[in-house]
Image (cartoon, rainbow, N blue to C red):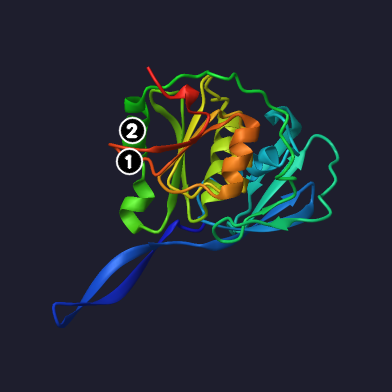
């Protein structure tokens, strides 16, 4: 198994003098995905929740719909390959599109097509104070970040508390890990909000839609395409969320008392 953090040493120059420091840094490592005995692709990721990431990726790509289709998902003894066996034959996508995801995300999904989901125009309703409270809960859940820095965190909430959280060097990987954790533990809440430290790209928006999340909250900015997609999908997109403020870029009707 590969540890998610690694001891390092560095030299700091401060106040006109050098000082040595020992610390830990986040690990970035290649992990391949094998489906029914065929290598599909290689993730660049942080080696934690790898089986969940693989299953969540297949779900977010529309390859599987439930755990009933997964016969086995197992990390190899060296920690550099996740073997997923499905209960049916599946065709590997003929082409993968490089996305703007950290560490080089890939997808075979048409990001311009509307997913097969339907969101109520005004539900769920969430007060502004609850949004800011969830941002604070996400910060408290960042265990790897506190140890190493340099890692993204995302969490799925039921509107009141965090149900599942995940960390990875790639922001897109955190959403795949959350999808996999929900699938493998049967923990889908009825009300679903996603909170993330990562920038909202079109890929992040697509994954949120696939997970049937009507409210997506980020600590940073959305891209122009993700705003267009959020309007088209009916997703409330919130950016630059802090414990005292946030911006709403689409479908503001869900934010209020």
Residue shown at the point (80%, 56%) measured from the top left: 95
**Label 2 element class:** helix
Residue shown at the point (72%, 30%) measured from the top left: 65
**Label 1 element class:** loop
Q: Is residue 114 left or right of residue 201?
A: right
Residue shown at the point (30%, 75%) measured from the top left: 10
Q: Residues within 10 Å of mark 2 (few under 14, many from 20)?
A: some
Circle nearer the N terminus (1, 2): 2
**Residue 240 drawn at (x, y percent):** 39, 44
CB within 8 Å, label 1 to label 2: yes
| Camera sees residue 50 | no
Residue closest to the eye, 104 or 246: 246
**Looking at the image, is 76 positioned above or below residue 208?**
below
Disc 1 marks which residue? 242
| Camera sees residue 108 | yes
**Looking at the image, is 161 positioned above or below residue 210?**
above
């Amino acid at each position: 198994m590969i540890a998610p953090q690694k001891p390092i040493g560095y030299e700091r120059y401060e106040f006109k003098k050098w000082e040595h420091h020992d610390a830990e840094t986040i690990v970035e490592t290649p992990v391949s995905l094998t489906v029914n005995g065929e290598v599909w692709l290689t993730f660049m990721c942080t080696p934690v929740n790898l089986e969940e990431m693989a299953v969540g990726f297949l779900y977010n790509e529309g390859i599987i719909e439930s755990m009933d289709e997964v016969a086995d998902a197992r990390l190899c003894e060296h920690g550099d390959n996740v073997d997923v066996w499905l209960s049916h034959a599946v065709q590997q996508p003929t082409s993968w599109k490089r996305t703007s995801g950290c560490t080089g995300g890939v997808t075979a999904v048409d990001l311009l097509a509307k997913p097969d989901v339907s969101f109520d125009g005004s539900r769920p309703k969430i007060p502004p104070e609850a949004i800011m409270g969830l941002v604070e809960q996400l910060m408290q859940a960042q265990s790897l970040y506190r140890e190493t820095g340099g890692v993204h965190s995302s969490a799925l909430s039921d509107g009141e508390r965090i149900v599942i959280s995940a960390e990875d060097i790639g922001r897109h990987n955190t959403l795949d890990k959350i999808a996999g954790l929900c699938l493998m533990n049967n923990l889908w809440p009825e009300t679903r909000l996603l909170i993330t430290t990562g920038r909202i790209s079109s890929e992040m928006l697509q994954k949120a839609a696939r997970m049937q999340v009507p409210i997506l909250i980020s600590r940073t900015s959305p891209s122009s395409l993700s705003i267009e997609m959020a309007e088209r999908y009916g997703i409330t997109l919130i950016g630059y969320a802090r414990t005292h403020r946030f911006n709403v870029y689409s479908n503001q009707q869900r934010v209020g008392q």
